[in-house]
Image: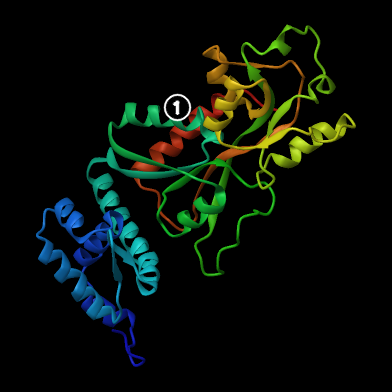
């Protein structure tokens, strides 16, 4: 559909693109079907098809390819999707800003988080937020920093809660013209060694790391912020890494392994606490093992904070400030 002479400019796109077309495009991408999108948008199928065809005509390229189960994005469509997400995110921020200005207690937040890093911090902060402003809608996206930080720069997330870099970040560097990120530290998270509450090793009165070396272990993945700390724990005792190791930072996977097999796991202390209180896990008395990482939040430096985001940040600071020092 596109021709080599097709050229776009900011002014030409402003004259031809319609925001409703972007909304329809997004819904077709999410549903993978023209029919399903029409139902969710309360529009007729021909109306949705017409909107997509008109958008393709104005852009000069085919956005979707028909498949056996619906439609999928073409290469041209994949390129346009990234920009459409950014534009729609800005539109959402505009709506939230206007609503926040009018009421100060509504809006929508999309929060990215590392599940292991925010087992207690984020739930406690969201609880405080919704107690104060119950009309705020919160969506939580779980991922790694390598995925969450780029999404934050694109405007798809409002904030990332979890581990913040204290050294040059290992995730891919954004382009020079990409929005800058601000990392705010709340507290340092300690490592602890945990087992299932009924693990036989708990019958031992005195335990040393060497006594556990021959057991199966769950350690952080090599690309995680805590992997170097985990290695250092064994190096300080002149021990190699255990021979039987599962590398995982998935809280649910680790919990399943711990409760099914006689396994020892290194976990963030705050992630272990709820399961210790529930009687599922026990922390082994090995003393200070090291720092798992620095927990905090990350926001875009160039974006003005709406009332909803400001409330969440206040809640995060309140909750993070009440946590004891973890060294």
Residue at 60% across / 37% down in the picture?
249
Q: Residue furthest front?
A: 68
> How many marks do you count on the picture?
1
79 relative position to 224: left or right: left
Query: Which colouring convention does the figure follow?
Result: rainbow
Q: Left or right: 249 with respect to 313?
A: right
Residue 268 location, quadrant: top right
In front of the other: 296 or 78: 78
Please, what secondary structure does the residue beneath circle 1 have?
helix
Which x, y percent locates residue 234?
A: 82, 32
Residue closest to the far right: 238
Q: Residues within 10 Å of mark 1 (few under 14, many from 20)?
A: some
Nearest the eye: 96 or 209: 209
Which is nearer the eye, 315 or 238?
238
Q: Position of residue 220 (x, y in %)?
A: 67, 38
Vertical side of 91 occupied by 112: above or below: above
Residue 67 spot, x, y in % from top left:
29, 65
* 300 to the left or right of 85: right
> In this rendering, is residue 57 above or below 141?
below
**Viewer-closest of 46 and 168:** 46
Please identify the quadrant where the N terminus is shown.
bottom left
Report the residue at 23% width, 80% height from top.
57
- Residue 166 pos. (x, y %): 67, 46
Q: Quadrant of the C terminus?
A: top right
Question: Where on the picture, by quarter, is residue 66?
Answer: bottom left
Residue at image position (16%, 68%) is 49
Residue beneath label 1, please?
A: 124
**Which quarter of the picture shows residue 107?**
top left
């Amino acid at each position: 559909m596109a021709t080599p002479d097709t050229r776009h400019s900011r002014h030409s796109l402003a004259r031809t693109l319609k925001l409703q077309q972007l909304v329809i495009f997004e819904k077709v991408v999410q549903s993978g079907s023209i029919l399903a999108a029409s139902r969710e948008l309360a529009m007729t199928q021909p109306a949705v098809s017409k909107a997509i065809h008109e958008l393709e005509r104005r852009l000069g390229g085919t956005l979707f390819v028909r498949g056996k189960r619906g439609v999928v994005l073409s290469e041209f469509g994949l390129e346009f999707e990234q920009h459409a997400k950014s534009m729609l995110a800005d539109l959402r921020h505009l709506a939230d800003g206007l609503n926040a200005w009018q009421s100060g207690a509504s809006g929508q937040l999309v929060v990215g988080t590392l599940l292991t890093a925010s087992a207690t911090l984020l739930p406690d902060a969201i609880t405080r937020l919704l107690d104060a402003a119950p009309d705020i809608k919160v969506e939580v996206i779980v991922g790694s920093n390598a995925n969450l930080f780029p999404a934050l720069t694109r405007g798809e997330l409002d904030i990332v809660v979890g581990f913040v870099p204290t050294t040059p970040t290992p995730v891919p560097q954004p382009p020079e013209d990409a929005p800058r990120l601000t990392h705010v530290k709340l507290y340092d998270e300690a490592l602890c060694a945990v087992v299932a509450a009924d693990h036989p090793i708990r019958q031992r009165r005195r335990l040393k790391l060497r006594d556990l070396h021959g057991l199966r272990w769950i350690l952080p993945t090599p690309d995680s912020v805590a992997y170097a700390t985990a290695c250092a724990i064994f190096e300080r005792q002149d021990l190699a890494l255990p021979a039987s190791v599962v590398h995982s930072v998935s809280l649910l996977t680790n919990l399943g392994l711990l409760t099914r097999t006689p396994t020892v796991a290194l976990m963030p202390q705050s992630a272990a606490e709820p399961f210790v209180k529930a009687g599922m896990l026990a922390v082994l008395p090995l003393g200070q093992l090291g720092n798992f990482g620095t927990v905090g939040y990350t926001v875009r430096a160039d974006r003005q904070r709406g009332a909803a985001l400001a409330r969440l940040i206040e809640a995060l600071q309140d909750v993070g400030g009440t946590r004891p020092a973890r060294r």
